[in-house]
Protein backbone atom coordinates (compact mmCIF):
# COMPACT_ATOMS: atom_id res chain seq x y z
CA UNK A 1 0.00 0.00 0.00
CA UNK A 2 1.46 3.37 -1.01
CA UNK A 3 0.29 5.13 2.12
CA UNK A 4 1.83 3.82 5.32
CA UNK A 5 1.26 4.63 8.93
CA UNK A 6 3.97 4.39 11.56
CA UNK A 7 3.08 4.79 15.22
CA UNK A 8 5.21 5.59 18.23
CA UNK A 9 5.95 2.00 19.12
CA UNK A 10 7.07 1.13 15.61
CA UNK A 11 9.74 3.73 15.09
CA UNK A 12 10.53 5.74 18.19
CA UNK A 13 10.39 5.85 21.92
CA UNK A 14 12.51 5.14 24.93
CA UNK A 15 11.84 2.98 27.96
CA UNK A 16 9.70 5.52 29.79
CA UNK A 17 6.78 6.36 27.55
CA UNK A 18 3.48 7.63 28.85
CA UNK A 19 1.32 4.76 30.05
CA UNK A 20 -1.86 6.46 31.22
CA UNK A 21 -4.97 7.44 29.30
CA UNK A 22 -4.90 11.07 28.26
CA UNK A 23 -8.04 13.14 27.91
CA UNK A 24 -6.39 15.32 25.29
CA UNK A 25 -4.33 13.86 22.44
CA UNK A 26 -3.51 15.96 19.38
CA UNK A 27 -2.98 13.97 16.17
CA UNK A 28 -0.90 15.52 13.40
CA UNK A 29 -0.68 13.79 10.01
CA UNK A 30 2.68 14.40 8.35
CA UNK A 31 2.04 14.12 4.60
CA UNK A 32 5.39 12.76 3.41
CA UNK A 33 4.40 12.78 -0.28
CA UNK A 34 6.04 12.88 -3.67
CA UNK A 35 4.84 15.92 -5.62
CA UNK A 36 3.11 15.82 -8.98
CA UNK A 37 3.35 18.20 -11.90
CA UNK A 38 1.42 21.43 -11.78
CA UNK A 39 -1.12 22.90 -9.38
CA UNK A 40 -4.00 20.70 -10.51
CA UNK A 41 -2.09 17.50 -9.75
CA UNK A 42 -0.70 18.95 -6.52
CA UNK A 43 -4.23 19.68 -5.37
CA UNK A 44 -5.48 16.22 -6.35
CA UNK A 45 -2.65 14.43 -4.54
CA UNK A 46 -2.99 16.75 -1.56
CA UNK A 47 -6.75 16.36 -1.31
CA UNK A 48 -6.53 12.57 -1.42
CA UNK A 49 -3.89 12.62 1.32
CA UNK A 50 -5.96 14.95 3.52
CA UNK A 51 -9.01 12.71 3.14
CA UNK A 52 -6.94 9.70 4.21
CA UNK A 53 -5.47 11.68 7.12
CA UNK A 54 -8.95 12.58 8.32
CA UNK A 55 -10.04 8.92 8.10
CA UNK A 56 -7.03 8.09 10.28
CA UNK A 57 -8.25 10.55 12.93
CA UNK A 58 -5.97 13.53 12.28
CA UNK A 59 -6.65 16.90 13.88
CA UNK A 60 -4.07 18.62 11.65
CA UNK A 61 -2.60 17.66 8.27
CA UNK A 62 0.79 19.17 7.40
CA UNK A 63 2.41 19.31 3.95
CA UNK A 64 6.16 19.41 3.22
CA UNK A 65 7.79 22.70 2.25
CA UNK A 66 6.50 24.63 -0.78
CA UNK A 67 4.00 21.95 -1.84
CA UNK A 68 2.53 24.07 -4.67
CA UNK A 69 5.69 23.52 -6.75
CA UNK A 70 7.37 20.60 -4.97
CA UNK A 71 10.17 22.90 -3.80
CA UNK A 72 11.35 23.26 -7.40
CA UNK A 73 11.53 26.83 -8.67
CA UNK A 74 13.46 28.87 -11.26
CA UNK A 75 16.06 31.53 -10.57
CA UNK A 76 14.87 33.83 -13.34
CA UNK A 77 12.76 36.60 -11.71
CA UNK A 78 10.03 36.60 -14.36
CA UNK A 79 9.68 32.81 -14.40
CA UNK A 80 9.74 32.77 -10.59
CA UNK A 81 6.84 35.22 -10.34
CA UNK A 82 4.94 33.28 -12.97
CA UNK A 83 5.24 30.10 -10.89
CA UNK A 84 4.35 31.82 -7.59
CA UNK A 85 0.70 31.97 -6.48
CA UNK A 86 -1.33 34.42 -4.40
CA UNK A 87 -2.23 33.36 -0.87
CA UNK A 88 -5.82 34.32 -1.64
CA UNK A 89 -5.85 32.42 -4.92
CA UNK A 90 -7.76 29.28 -5.90
CA UNK A 91 -5.07 26.76 -4.90
CA UNK A 92 -4.66 27.99 -1.33
CA UNK A 93 -8.36 28.73 -0.85
CA UNK A 94 -9.25 25.23 -2.03
CA UNK A 95 -7.40 23.80 0.96
CA UNK A 96 -9.30 26.15 3.25
CA UNK A 97 -12.54 24.81 1.85
CA UNK A 98 -11.22 21.27 2.25
CA UNK A 99 -10.34 21.94 5.91
CA UNK A 100 -13.95 22.99 6.55
CA UNK A 101 -15.29 20.02 4.59
CA UNK A 102 -13.19 17.54 6.56
CA UNK A 103 -13.45 19.32 9.94
CA UNK A 104 -9.64 19.15 10.14
CA UNK A 105 -6.95 21.83 10.24
CA UNK A 106 -4.61 21.91 7.21
CA UNK A 107 -1.19 23.50 6.87
CA UNK A 108 -0.73 24.11 3.14
CA UNK A 109 2.65 25.31 1.83
CA UNK A 110 3.41 27.20 -1.36
CA UNK A 111 5.60 29.57 -3.33
CA UNK A 112 3.81 32.85 -2.62
CA UNK A 113 3.53 35.87 -4.88
CA UNK A 114 3.56 38.66 -2.32
CA UNK A 115 3.23 42.15 -3.80
CA UNK A 116 6.51 42.64 -5.71
CA UNK A 117 8.31 39.77 -3.95
CA UNK A 118 8.15 35.96 -3.79
CA UNK A 119 8.13 34.09 -0.48
CA UNK A 120 8.27 30.57 0.97
CA UNK A 121 4.98 30.36 2.87
CA UNK A 122 2.61 28.22 4.92
CA UNK A 123 -1.03 29.04 5.57
CA UNK A 124 -2.72 27.18 8.41
CA UNK A 125 -6.48 26.80 8.14
CA UNK A 126 -8.46 25.66 11.17
CA UNK A 127 -11.14 22.99 11.00
CA UNK A 128 -13.74 25.63 10.11
CA UNK A 129 -11.71 26.68 7.08
CA UNK A 130 -10.65 29.97 8.66
CA UNK A 131 -7.12 31.28 8.14
CA UNK A 132 -5.23 31.27 11.39
CA UNK A 133 -1.59 31.76 10.32
CA UNK A 134 0.12 32.87 7.14
CA UNK A 135 3.84 32.63 7.84
CA UNK A 136 6.69 33.32 5.42
CA UNK A 137 10.04 31.66 6.10
CA UNK A 138 12.23 34.10 8.02
CA UNK A 139 15.56 32.32 7.55
CA UNK A 140 15.68 31.79 3.79
CA UNK A 141 18.73 29.95 2.47
CA UNK A 142 20.33 33.01 0.89
CA UNK A 143 23.46 30.98 0.09
CA UNK A 144 21.53 28.74 -2.33
CA UNK A 145 18.46 28.69 -4.56
CA UNK A 146 16.40 30.64 -2.01
CA UNK A 147 18.51 33.75 -2.58
CA UNK A 148 15.79 34.80 -5.05
CA UNK A 149 13.14 34.72 -2.30
CA UNK A 150 12.16 37.43 0.16
CA UNK A 151 12.26 36.40 3.84
CA UNK A 152 9.33 36.88 6.20
CA UNK A 153 9.54 39.30 9.10
CA UNK A 154 7.88 37.71 12.13
CA UNK A 155 6.78 34.52 13.88
CA UNK A 156 3.16 33.87 14.83
CA UNK A 157 1.27 31.80 17.41
CA UNK A 158 -2.50 31.27 17.44
CA UNK A 159 -5.10 29.42 19.46
CA UNK A 160 -6.12 26.63 17.11
CA UNK A 161 -9.53 25.06 17.63
CA UNK A 162 -9.23 21.28 17.19
CA UNK A 163 -11.34 18.27 18.09
CA UNK A 164 -8.79 17.65 20.84
CA UNK A 165 -9.48 21.12 22.23
CA UNK A 166 -7.74 24.50 21.82
CA UNK A 167 -3.98 24.30 21.20
CA UNK A 168 -1.46 27.12 20.83
CA UNK A 169 0.28 26.49 17.50
CA UNK A 170 3.15 28.21 15.72
CA UNK A 171 5.09 27.58 12.51
CA UNK A 172 8.65 27.66 11.27
CA UNK A 173 10.02 26.34 7.97
CA UNK A 174 13.04 24.08 7.38
CA UNK A 175 16.19 26.26 7.78
CA UNK A 176 14.46 28.19 10.60
CA UNK A 177 15.30 25.22 12.83
CA UNK A 178 19.02 26.07 12.51
CA UNK A 179 18.45 29.16 14.66
CA UNK A 180 17.49 28.58 18.31
CA UNK A 181 15.84 32.00 18.31
CA UNK A 182 13.04 30.79 16.01
CA UNK A 183 11.64 28.20 18.41
CA UNK A 184 12.48 30.37 21.42
CA UNK A 185 10.37 33.25 20.11
CA UNK A 186 7.50 30.87 19.37
CA UNK A 187 7.77 29.48 22.92
CA UNK A 188 7.79 33.00 24.38
CA UNK A 189 4.64 33.73 22.38
CA UNK A 190 3.00 30.71 24.00
CA UNK A 191 3.35 27.96 21.39
CA UNK A 192 2.71 24.42 22.62
CA UNK A 193 3.24 22.75 19.25
CA UNK A 194 5.30 24.00 16.28
CA UNK A 195 4.60 22.84 12.72
CA UNK A 196 7.71 22.57 10.49
CA UNK A 197 7.38 22.01 6.73
CA UNK A 198 10.71 20.79 5.36
CA UNK A 199 12.60 19.98 2.14
CA UNK A 200 16.15 18.71 2.69
CA UNK A 201 18.07 15.57 3.68
CA UNK A 202 17.17 14.82 7.29
CA UNK A 203 20.22 13.26 8.91
CA UNK A 204 21.22 12.84 12.54
CA UNK A 205 22.40 16.41 13.07
CA UNK A 206 19.32 18.10 11.65
CA UNK A 207 17.10 15.70 13.58
CA UNK A 208 19.14 16.53 16.68
CA UNK A 209 18.46 20.23 16.14
CA UNK A 210 14.72 19.56 16.18
CA UNK A 211 15.08 17.43 19.28
CA UNK A 212 17.03 20.24 20.95
CA UNK A 213 14.42 22.87 20.04
CA UNK A 214 11.73 20.69 21.64
CA UNK A 215 13.83 19.94 24.73
CA UNK A 216 15.00 23.47 25.51
CA UNK A 217 11.56 25.03 24.99
CA UNK A 218 9.36 22.24 26.39
CA UNK A 219 7.16 22.19 23.30
CA UNK A 220 6.14 19.76 20.58
CA UNK A 221 7.73 19.93 17.15
CA UNK A 222 6.24 18.14 14.12
CA UNK A 223 8.33 18.17 10.91
CA UNK A 224 7.10 17.02 7.49
CA UNK A 225 9.67 16.31 4.77
CA UNK A 226 9.49 15.00 1.20
CA UNK A 227 10.28 11.28 0.84
CA UNK A 228 13.22 9.70 -0.92
CA UNK A 229 12.72 10.12 -4.65
CA UNK A 230 12.32 13.87 -4.38
CA UNK A 231 15.51 15.75 -5.22
CA UNK A 232 17.78 16.24 -2.18
CA UNK A 233 15.21 14.80 0.24
CA UNK A 234 15.06 11.52 2.16
CA UNK A 235 11.88 11.45 4.24
CA UNK A 236 12.46 10.97 7.98
CA UNK A 237 9.60 13.24 9.00
CA UNK A 238 9.61 13.41 12.78
CA UNK A 239 7.88 14.56 15.93
CA UNK A 240 9.26 15.36 19.39
CA UNK A 241 6.98 16.21 22.31
CA UNK A 242 9.56 17.98 24.51
CA UNK A 243 8.89 15.81 27.58
CA UNK A 244 12.28 14.61 28.81
CA UNK A 245 11.27 13.21 32.21
CA UNK A 246 8.14 11.71 33.74
CA UNK A 247 7.36 12.36 37.42
CA UNK A 248 7.55 8.67 38.31
CA UNK A 249 10.26 7.70 35.81
CA UNK A 250 13.71 6.64 37.05
CA UNK A 251 15.54 8.36 34.19
CA UNK A 252 15.26 10.38 31.02
CA UNK A 253 12.70 9.60 28.35
CA UNK A 254 12.98 9.61 24.56
CA UNK A 255 11.06 12.70 23.40
CA UNK A 256 10.65 11.27 19.89
CA UNK A 257 7.03 10.26 19.36
CA UNK A 258 7.41 9.59 15.64
CA UNK A 259 10.30 8.96 13.28
CA UNK A 260 9.33 8.08 9.71
CA UNK A 261 11.39 6.16 7.20
CA UNK A 262 12.25 7.25 3.67
CA UNK A 263 9.11 5.98 1.92
CA UNK A 264 6.12 8.09 0.85
CA UNK A 265 3.25 7.91 3.28
CA UNK A 266 1.04 9.54 5.85
CA UNK A 267 2.72 9.37 9.25
CA UNK A 268 0.65 10.14 12.35
CA UNK A 269 2.25 11.93 15.30
CA UNK A 270 0.30 11.89 18.56
CA UNK A 271 0.95 14.56 21.17
CA UNK A 272 -0.34 13.92 24.69
CA UNK A 273 -1.24 17.50 25.58
CA UNK A 274 -2.06 16.73 29.21
CA UNK A 275 1.36 15.17 29.63
CA UNK A 276 3.09 18.06 27.87
CA UNK A 277 1.25 20.75 29.81
CA UNK A 278 1.91 19.08 33.14
CA UNK A 279 5.60 18.78 32.30
CA UNK A 280 5.77 22.39 31.21
CA UNK A 281 4.16 23.58 34.44
CA UNK A 282 6.72 21.93 36.71
CA UNK A 283 10.04 21.71 34.84
CA UNK A 284 12.86 24.23 34.57
CA UNK A 285 13.42 24.82 30.84
CA UNK A 286 11.72 27.29 28.51
CA UNK A 287 11.15 30.67 30.15
CA UNK A 288 11.53 29.59 33.78
CA UNK A 289 15.02 30.93 34.58
CA UNK A 290 16.00 33.00 31.58
CA UNK A 291 18.11 36.15 32.05
CA UNK A 292 17.14 38.37 29.11
CA UNK A 293 18.91 41.35 30.69
CA UNK A 294 22.17 39.51 29.96
CA UNK A 295 21.47 38.72 26.32
CA UNK A 296 22.13 42.08 24.68
CA UNK A 297 24.61 40.63 22.21
CA UNK A 298 21.88 38.46 20.70
CA UNK A 299 20.01 41.49 19.33
CA UNK A 300 22.95 43.56 18.17
CA UNK A 301 22.86 43.95 14.40
CA UNK A 302 26.49 43.11 13.64
CA UNK A 303 27.41 41.34 10.41
Image (spheres, rainbow, N blue to C red):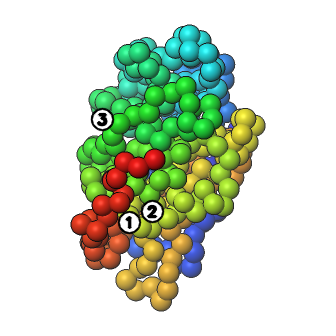
Classify residue 280 by image quadrant: bottom left
Label 2 to label 1: alpha-carbon separation: 6 Å
Vertical placement of residue 187 versus 160, above or below: below
Q: Nearer the viewer, residue 33 or 59?
A: 33
Question: Horizontal and vertical percent for residue 6?
Answer: 62, 54
Direction from residue 74 to residue 151 in the image, left or right = left
Q: Is residue 57 visible?
A: no
Residue at image mark 2? 214
- Compared to residue 97, the image places residue 31 above or below, namely below
Disc number at residue 132?
3
Residue, far right: 229
Q: How many residues crowd around disc 3 within 10 Å: few (fewer than 14), some, or many (20 or more)?
A: many
Q: Secondary structure at mark 1?
A: loop
Q: Residues within 10 Å of mark 1 (few under 14, many from 20)?
A: many
> Residue at coordinates 27% horizontally, 44% vertically from top-left?
158
Q: Do the residues under discs 2 and 1 have CB atoms within 8 angstroms?
A: yes
Which residue is pictured at 28% across the width and 57% down the height? 188
Tell me the element at label 3.
Answer: strand
Image coordinates of residue 37 in percent, x first then y, are 66, 19
Task: Say whether disc 1 or disc 3 marks the residue closer to the N-terminus.
Answer: 3
**In the image, residue 2 lies at what x, y percent?**
70, 38
Residue behind mark 1: 218
Amino acid sequence: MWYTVFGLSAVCGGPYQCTGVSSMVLKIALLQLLPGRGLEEQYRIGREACEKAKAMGADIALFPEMWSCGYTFPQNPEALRELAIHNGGEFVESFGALAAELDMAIGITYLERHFTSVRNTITLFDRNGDRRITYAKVHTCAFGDERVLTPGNDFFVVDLDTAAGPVKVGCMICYDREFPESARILMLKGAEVVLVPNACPMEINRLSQLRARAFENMLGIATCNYPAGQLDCNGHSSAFDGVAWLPDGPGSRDMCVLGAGEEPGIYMAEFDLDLMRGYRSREVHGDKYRRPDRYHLLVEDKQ
